[in-house]
Structure formats: structure tokens, C-alpha cells
Image (spheres, grey):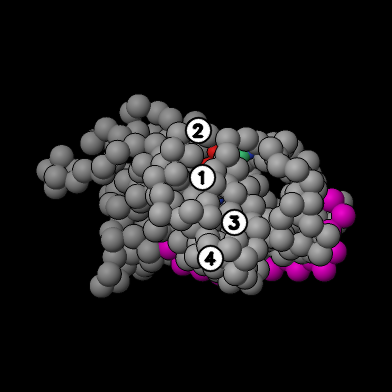
Amino acid sequence: MADSGFQLQGSGPEAYERYMVPVHCDALAEDLVERMQIRPGEAVLDVASGTGVVTRSAARRVGTLGRVLGIELNPAMIEVARKAAAFFDQVEFRAGSALELPVEDRQFDAVLCQQAIMFIPDRELAIREMFRALKPGGRVGLNVFRSLEHIPAFVCLVEALAKHASPSAAEFMRAPFVMESLAQMRALFEQAGFSNIEALIRVGEQRYPSVEHFVRYETLNIPDPEIQSEALQQALTREMELLCQGQVDDRGVIFPVQQFVVTAER
Ligand SMILES: C[S@@+](CC[C@H](N)C(=O)[O-])C[C@H]1O[C@@H](n2cnc3c(N)ncnc32)[C@H](O)[C@@H]1O
């Protein structure tokens, strides 16, 4: 904050890679490639690869005899992803949509998709595209947040935004938490033709150095110029400090989070 000298570096994709990936994505990516038992020499597709956290994690497993292709809609995310994966010869990023994957049929041993299906308008088509990209017997693995009521920290943040910022800021914060049920997840994969579907609930954690960091990080990408004003950040932090008292420990603040994780085979 102005009086505490709090400053986050960068914006957009750089900030996503610097702040969100360690909090939200690193552990999830490791969990996903571990569940999927990604092996040396495999060809892996990472759909909606963002800044490439899953791509890099898979690249470490496939080694130099394998390959990992990240497909991502936003070229600015790809730019950051390419820099972050510069030392992996086995990695490539391509601009493209999950709804029309720029790949040939039946090319991949595994398709991964982390924390993105909720943003894709035609989810059925996206899952069918993943099926198309897989070799027969290939595996798919996807994770996504559960709905908001399962993630109390974000319930509180949505309320704080509605109170201090604007209805549109609160709506933006709600957007990732739309997947309702395991049955809904399972149906997407069944309809696409997958078999051996396993749909699970994963309970994880997110840790931030402080409540102020939580507010700063999570409001970074809200498309509202007012959101970064010191007055608003201070109001949100004060509100969240009250609501989060029970979650503060000697290393900052920690919250439980729940995801759906679905694995299946073509
Ligand atoms: C929350 S990020 C997750 C990125 C990455 N998988 C990770 O774990 O960090 C969601 C990503 O999905 C991408 N995305 C949204 N719709 C897409 C689409 N139709 N096709 C490809 N990527 C898409 C966004 O640009 C964004 O990078």
C-alpha cells in the first residue's frame, strides 16, 4: 500500500506467471502430471496452456525424447510461456483455440488441461477436440475449481468486492467458479466418447504471504482501473483481514480450495 510501499511488478501475463502460478498452479500442475503418469518419450498436449506451468511440468517428465505442445488463445500468455520454457528443447507453444485445436488427429499420448475449461464457452466441443487429438488408448486429465461455495476465501472476496468496488468486479471474481457437479464433469467426457472416466474431488490449499498479498494478487486482473487505487485496496484488505482472521498463521494466510479432477482414456 502507499504507506507500506507495497508494489507488485508487471501486469497481465507477467504478473500471472510471477504471482498466480506459485499460489494457484504449481502444485496443481505437479498433481496432474503425477496422476497422469506422464512418461519419458511421450507426446503431450497442454490445452489452454497459459504461461506454461503444466507444459513445463510435463516436459520434465517426457524428457528430451518426448515432446509437449501448449495451445493457448492469448498471444501475450504465449510470449511469457516461451521465455519461461526457453531451456526445454522438447516444448513448443502454438496460438490456437481449444475449440479448434491446431493439431492433427490421434497425435498425442496424453492431453492435459488445467484451470481453463470453465472459461471455454462450448465445453462439449473442447472435450471432443481433446478426444480427437489423442491416440487410441491415450489419456486425458483435467482440473478445474469447484463452485464458489466450496472455496470460502473467494466467497469472502466476492462479497468484499460487491461492497467496496462494483457489481462487475464481484462478477469477474465469480467467473472461474462455475463448474457445479461431478456428474456434469463426467457427462462432458462420456458425451465425447471417453472411457475409464474417473471424476474426483481434490482438496488443496492456497497460501499467500499475507492477507494484503491475497487481495493484491487476486484483484490484479480485474478489468477496472479503480481496482488498484490505494483507497480501494486498503478497504478490501481491511475487510478481508477481519474475515480471514482464523486463517492467519506464522507464514501468512492459508485457505482450503477444492477442485474437480477428471481423468479418462480414449
Ligand atoms: C486460468 S488460465 C490457466 C492457464 C494454465 N493452464 C495454468 O494452469 O496456469 C486460463 C487460460 O485459458 C486460456 N483460454 C481461454 N479460452 C481459451 C480457448 N478457447 N482456447 C485456448 N485457450 C483458452 C486463457 O487465455 C488463459 O490463458
Pointer 4 residue: 63
The residues tagged by marks 1 and 4 sit, at their Cα atoms, a distance apart of 21 Å
Element type where label 3 sits in the image: strand
Q: Residue at 30% across / 34% down in the picture?
A: 228
Q: Is residue 71 left or right of residue 211?
A: right
Element type where label 1 sits in the image: loop
Compared with residue 106, is residue 166 higher up or lower down, i.e. above or below?
above
The residues tagged by marks 3 and 1 sit, at their Cα atoms, a distance apart of 17 Å
Residue 85 at x, y = what percent?
Answer: 43, 51
Which amino acid lies under the numbered mark 4 shown in the image of this protein? Gly
Q: Is residue 1 left or right of residue 75?
A: left
Classify mark 3 as within 8 Å of ligand 1 or not, answering yes or no: no
Q: In this rendered view, identify the residue nearer to me: 199 or 102.
A: 102
The residues tagged by marks 3 and 4 sit, at their Cα atoms, a distance apart of 8 Å
Which amino acid lies under the numbered mark 2 shown in the image of this protein? Pro
Pointer 2 residue: 75
Q: Quadrant of residue 39?
A: bottom right
- Label drawn at residue 50: 1
Start and end of the magenta stretch? 192-206
- Badge 3 or badge 1: first in the primary sequence: 1
The residues tagged by marks 2 and 4 sit, at their Cα atoms, a distance apart of 26 Å
- Badge 2 or badge 3: first in the primary sequence: 3
Tell me if label 3 and label 4 are in contact, CB under 8 Å: no
- Badge 2 or badge 4: first in the primary sequence: 4
